[in-house]
Every structure is written in C-alpha cells, then in structure tokens.
Image (cartoon, rainbow, N blue to C red):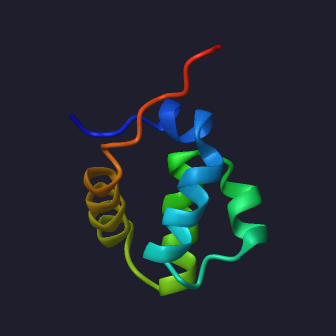
Amino acid sequence: MAMTWENAEANWEEFKGRLKTRWGKITNAHLDSIAGKRASLLAAVQELYNVSLEEAETQVASFEQYTKDIKPKTAS
C-alpha cells in the first residue's frame, strides 16, 4: 500500500528528513511551505530541478513507494 498524504501531514517531521535526503536542493523554507501537501512538493521539485510535471510526478510516486512504511501516528 502506498503512503497517503494524510500520513505525510501527520508525520511531517519524519517526512521532512526523508524529503531532504531524496531531494537535496529542498531547503527548510521549502519544507515549511510544502507542509505535507503533495501539490506543493510537485511544484518545488519542478522548480528546483527544472523538470516537467510528468517527471516530478514520477519522482514523487517513487518517493511514495519508498515511504510507504510510515504509519499515521495514533492518539495516546
């Protein structure tokens, strides 16, 4: 099962580290702007790496497979 962006928002601190590992040009300011939103990540990848929307989609889809192990946090 692929990750969901609801999980990304709920676990944003963990995702931020993985995003920086995957896309080294992403800064903390970008991460603050992205804030767990897939569309914002796509736009950042397109801009920072000068790739098409289709290529950004491919890269983000690959990242989603890589992060599918992250489960949503549960309330204690």
Above or below residue 57? Residue 13 is: above
* Drawn side of residue 20 relative to residue 52, left or right: right
Q: Position of residue 50 (x, y in %)?
A: 47, 86
- Name the quadrant of the C terminus: top right
Question: Image height check: is 8 above or below 30?
Answer: above
At horizontal 58% and vertical 40% (from top left) the residue drawn is: 11
Q: Residue at x 78, y 69 (%)?
A: 29
Foreground of the two, 44 or 68? 68
Depth check, front residue: 61 or 19: 19
Q: Which image quadrant is residue 4 in?
A: top left
Q: Is residue 39 left or right of residue 62?
A: right
Residue 54 lies in what quarter of the image?
A: bottom left
Most distant residue in the top direction: 76
Q: Check the image and name the residue furthest to the left.
A: 1
In this picture, residue 53 sits left or right of residue 27 = left
Q: Can you say whether 34 is above or below 20 in the image?
A: above
Could you tell me residue 3's position as x and y percent?
35, 39
Report how many numbered discs are placed on residues in the image: 0
Quadrant of the drawing holding the N terminus: top left
The quadrant holding residue 59 is bottom left
Name the spot of residue 16 as percent of width and height, x first: 60, 60
Question: Residue at horizontal 68%, vertical 49%?
Answer: 35
